Amino acid sequence: MSYCINPACPNPENITHTELCQACGSKLLLRDRYRISQALGQGGFGATFLAIDESLPGEPNCVLKQLRPTSTAPHVLQMARDLFRREAKTLGKIGSHPQVPRLLDYFEANQEFYLVQEYVGGATLQQEIKRGGPLSEAGIKQFLSEILPVLQYVHSQQVIHRDIKPANIIRRTQDAKLVLIDFGAVKDQVSQTSMSVSEQTALTAYAIGTPGYAPPEQMAMRPVYASDIYAVGVTCIYLLTGKSPKDLDYDPATGELMWEKHVHVTEHFASVLRKMLEVSVRHRFQSAAEILRALDLEPYLDSLAKSMSTQNQGNPQNPTRRQSGDRTDETGSPVTASPAARVAMAIRARQAKSDSTSLQSGMSRNRVLAAKPSSLTALRSKGSTTGQPKVPPKIDAQALQLAYSKGRRDFAAYDLSLLSLQRASLSGAIFHQSKLNNANLQGANLFNADFGRASLNGINLRDANLSRAYLSHADLEGADLRGADLSHAYLANANLRGANLCGANLTGAKVTDEQLSAARTNWATVRPGGKKGLW
C-alpha cells in the first residue's frame, strides 16, 4: 500500500506503486525514493510513518518523521522546526550506538521537514507488559543492566533524552536487545532564561517530556542528567506493577510517587528505586554508573561485610562514621548515608534482634533483608555473649512450595541444598545468595527467578525454564543445565566451570564467550546470538 502523508488528505490509502494520491493528488514517492506504507503515530510536533526505501536493494524498511505541529502560530512553528533539527542533529551524533536508531536521511521538501531513521522491529516495553503482565525484581534488574549502559552512553555525549518511558523503549526482534527511541525532546545548549511566556508555553507543549515520568526540575524547564534517572525509575515501577504514574497516588506534602505498597521486592532493591525516584535532584542518583554500582552492593556480600568490619575497627559505636563519601553533622551522625553505610547500619540493627527472620532494622526507611550468616558473624560486636554463629534458615520442599502458593516469593539466604523440587512452579521466586547445592529442580518453572550470588554447585536444572532469570555472580560449577531455557537470562560474572549446557537455549543471554568456554556445550546449544553450534 502507498500511504499519503498530506494532513488534509480525505483518503490517504492508495494501491502499491501509485505515483500520485488518488484522493488529493499529492506525490507519494518522497525524494524519489521513500514510499510510505502505513502511519505509526503522531506526537506533539511530528507524525511518524513506516516507509520503504525503493532506491536500495531489497527495499528495506525505515521510519520517516514529518514535521506536523498542532499549532500554526509562527513562534510554535519555529519552535517545532528547532526541535526537529535538534532530533536530527542528536541522532546524527549518537546514532552510532547499536541500541540507538541510526539517522539515515534528513531533508526539506515543499517547505516541510522530514527525518528518516533506522526501522527497529519489535514491541515496546509498554506493549510487552500489556501482553504478558508485570516483571519480577529479577526482570527489572535485567532491564536496568541493559538500559543503563545505553543511557550512560547518551549522557556521555552531553545529551539528556527527557522522554524515557516504556513506550519509547523497544525490544528489537532480531536480537532481543533494548533500543531507546524518540529523541525529539532532547535537551540542547539553548538557554531557556530569555524566552517569552508564549515561547515557554510552546516548549512545554512540545519538548518537556511525559507527565508522570518527568521529574519536578524538568517540569520547571531545568532538566539535568539525573532527570533521565528519575524517568527510568518510574519506568521500573510501571514494569513492576503495570500501572502508569497517573494511576498511582502522590504524597501531597512531598510530591513523592507512592509506589511501595504496589510492589514486592527486596529491601535493598527498594532502596535503589527510592534513590532513583528522589524528588530532590541532589539526593537522587546522578549517573547510570552509580545505579549499576549500587545494584552490585547486595546486602549479603561477605566482602562488603569484611570491608566494613575492617574500616570500623576503632570506632565500634559509630560504624557508618568512616564510610567514604558520607557527611556527618557536628554530633557525628550521618547526614546522607551511602549504600554501603546503610547496609552496615542495617546489619548492626539486625544483630540486636532475637528473631532471625526479622527484616526490620529499626531505622527509618533503611531496612534490609536477612544477611548471610557469615556476614553477621564477621560483624558481630565485641560485647556479644551468644558465642554461637547463626546458621542459614532451612525449609523443606513441601513447606517451600506451600509458602510460594500462599504468595511468598522471598527465600533469600536460605539453605536449600539437596531439596527435590522437580517440575516445581517457582516463577519470580527470590533465592538470592541461597544455597541450592545438589538440589533437584529438573523441569522446574523458574522464569524471572533471582539466583544472584547463589551457590548452585551440582544442581540439576535440566530442562528447567530459566528464561529471564537473574544469575549474576551465581556459582553454577558442575550444574546440569542440559536442555534448559536460559533465553535472556542475566549470567554476568556467573561461574560456569564444568556446567553442562548441551542443548541449552542461551538466546539473548547476558554471558561472555570466556564464561562459556569453561562450560560443556554441543551442536544443539543455542548461542546468545540465536544460532546453534559449537563455541
Image: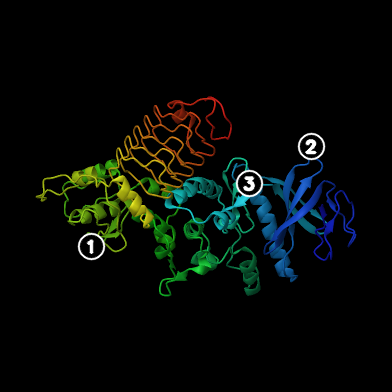
**Label for residue 402?**
none
Q: Which residue is mark 2?
A: 57
User: Toward which corner of the image does residue 270 lie, by quadrant?
Assistant: bottom left
Q: Does the image show residue 43?
A: yes
Residue 204 in the image: state x and y as whole percent. Answer: 61, 68
Compared to residue 165, the image places residue 200 above or below, namely below
Q: Are marks 2 and 3 in contact (CB under 8 Å)?
A: no
**Label for residue 93?**
3
**Residue type, label 1:** Glu
**Residue type, label 3:** Lys
Q: Is residue 426 left or right of residue 21?
A: left
Q: Which residue is mark 1?
A: 330
User: Toward which corner of the image does residue 45 lie, by quadrant?
Assistant: bottom right
Q: Secondary structure at mark 3?
A: helix
Residue 474 in the image: state x and y as whole percent. Answer: 37, 38
Task: Using a 10 Å C-alpha cutoff, classify the residue at mark 1 as few (fewer than 14 neighbours), some (14 to 19) or many (20 or more).
Answer: few
What residue lies at 65% left-to-right and 69% top-to-bottom?
202
N-terminal-most mark, 2 or 3? 2
Q: Are marks 3 and 1 in contact (CB under 8 Å)?
A: no
Residue 48 in the image: state x and y as whole percent. Answer: 72, 56
Residue 101 in the image: state x and y as whole percent. Answer: 64, 47
